[in-house]
Every structure is written in C-alpha cells, then in structure tokens.
Amino acid sequence: MSVMAAFLLTLSCEKKTTPALIERGTFPDSLIILSDINSAYDDYNSDIHQLSAGSPIVFSSNRGSSGGQFDLVHGAFAYSFVQENGDFLMFSEMAPDPFLAQLVLKVNTAGDDFGPYRFYSPIDGYEYLVVSSEYTSGDLDFQYTKNLPYFGTAIPAIADSKPVALLNSSANDAYFCFNPGQDTVYFCRDTDGSFDIWMLPKQTEANMDEWFSQEAANPVRVDALSSAANDKCPYIFRKIMVFASDREGGEGGFDLYYSEFENGAWGTPVNFGPAINTASDEYRPILSGNEEFTNMFLLFSSNRPGGKGGYDLYFRGTDLF
C-alpha cells in the first residue's frame, strides 16, 4: 500500500468513527507549499481531474532535464479535516500511477509541453487531455489524447495524440479550458505580440474528437478579460474564471486575477491582492472545491522566495463564494 493510500484509508476510518461535531471543513487562508511534489527546478502549469479527497495532479516540470525542457509529470495530493476541531489535514507525494504514466508519455514531445487540462465529455463518454506543445513548427499548438474513463485497476487504451486543428494557428496557442457546460472553450493566444484570452463556442451535439478535428476556426478575443499586457492561463470553476496577467496595477510580475460571469458577460477582472500575489510571478491558477468544505481553494505556481527553487506549487483557501 502506498503512503497516499494509507493516508486516505486513515481519513476514511476517522470519518466513520468520529462524531460529526463540525459538519464542514474550511480550506486554510494560509499558503501551503506542496513540498513533496515540488523540486529544485520549475514545477508549474498544474491540472487536477478529480474533485475528491484524493486528487491526481498532472503538471509541467523541467526537473527531468535539470532545468531545460519541460515535460508533463504526475503526482497526487489529499486533504481532509478533523470533525472534532476543524483542523485541516493535507498530504502530497509524487505517487506512481500506471495510467497517468502512460498518459503523459502520449503527449510529452521533444519540445516544451505546457498547460495540461483533463476533462470528461458526457456527449461521447470519453476522457480527454489537452496540452500545449512545441511539437510542430516551433510555436505552441494544442494536442490531445482520448481514452475511456479510468476506474479501478483496468487501464484503458489511450489514443495517440492528435493536433487540435480547430484551435491551432501560426501564433502561440496555450492553456485550453472549458466553461462548466462545455459549450464554450477559452484559451490564450499571442496574435498581436502579447497574450490575450480568446473564446470559441462549441456545437453542443458534436463529439469532442470530431470538433477538435475541424478546420481552424476564428475565435473571438474576450475584451473584458484582455489588456495591453499578457493575459494567460484561463481556468473556470462554476461561474468564476481565474487567470494570470502582468498588466499594470498588480503586485509585480504576473499576478492572479478573477472574473465572475453574470448576465451573459465576464465582469471586470479583480486582483487577488497581496494575500496571494507578490512581487514575484504567480502563474496558472486552478480554482476548485469540495462540498464538504465551506470555501474554495486555489492551486497555483509561484517563483517567490521560500520554495524549493524556480517555480513551486502552492495551495490556499479562498472565499470567492
């Protein structure tokens, strides 16, 4: 049994035997560095696929090349709270996973590989992984894999990666994400020299595989989210988009921002402020949550002092809802 499995089993036993004095936990408003996942090199651009106490995490790292090329690697983290007093518990490790090991091998290229995004499509019943890679002409383009959902010990076949022809262009295309209904895709592109956030509606009845393979489309720049600076790494949870930007007015370098979708439009982006942002770079935010907790959490990267080196992965609670 792995250390992670033992941790989850312990949490399960505690939940069954401890009186439910506190019904819901709270993600802490202090930073937690994922020390057992981070390395002395750059670890960033993470994604999580399961919203549960045990979450597999796929992210970009240049640890394998000692600071050179970025490839996807994988690990896991788990969290819970003590029902007697509300104390928050968290554990992370570079846990071996036979499925994820095969999955990242399908998309790692001879160039840099960034911004993994895994999702399940209820339309065709498949899971997809979308990655932005330097695998064609040297600019960043999207590629994707497809597989049946992975449950238990049976590892499904993973299709060889294919280009997302629909979204790839002569510019750099990166950081794919869907809105909750999977009827609109968002990503960033540097058509005019700096990155902006773009969107493209999806035909709701089309299978992902078919849609990705269509001829290149003409996405729309989201002016409400884009600035004269670089606006990157969009990620949506419920009705909130979080992203990174080096626009004027921040704490320094890239900062994390959020915007709420209301009445059919994205609101003015709001800086998370000095509780999260620093004079260093904060990058690729992931917003998520769990019904057993009263608030949401951010998983993001930063090259601030105090980590293991380069970019490190951080975790923090947030009260956006």
Image (cartoon, helix red, strand yellow):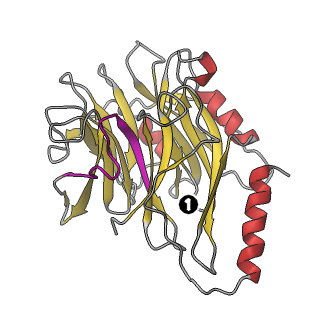
In which quarter of the view is residue 16 placed?
bottom right
Quadrant the C terminus occupies: bottom left
Of residues 309 and 124, the one nearer the viewer is 309
In which quarter of the view is residue 249 placed?
top left
Q: Which residue is under mark 1?
A: 51
Residue 301 seen in the current view: yes
- Lateral position of residue 237 relative to residue 21, left or right: left
Of residues 74 and 300, the one nearer the viewer is 300
Looking at the image, the residue that sits furthest to the right is 1
What's the residue at 63%, 51% (across, down)? 77
Q: Is residue 228 above or below residue 266?
A: above
Percent position (x, y) of residue 238? 37, 63
Residue 116 seen in the current view: no
Percent position (x, y) of residue 269? 20, 51
- Within 10 Å of the Cα at label 1, are there few (<14), some (14-19), or many (20+) other Cα atoms? few
Magenta segment includes 296: no
State which region is magenta: 269-287
Where disc 1 sits, the SS reads: loop
- Lateral position of residue 309 relative to residue 232, left or right: right
Q: What kind of residue is marked 1?
A: Leu
Percent position (x, y) of residue 191? 22, 25
In which quarter of the view is residue 222 placed?
top left
What's the residue at 46%, 40% (across, down)? 210
- Lateral position of residue 44 relative to residue 221, left or right: right
Percent position (x, y) of residue 217? 29, 34
What's the residue at 17%, 24% (across, down)? 192
Looking at the image, the residue that sits furthest to the top is 137
What's the residue at 41%, 25% (across, down)? 141
Of residues 241 and 154, the one nearer the viewer is 241
Number of labels in the image equals: 1
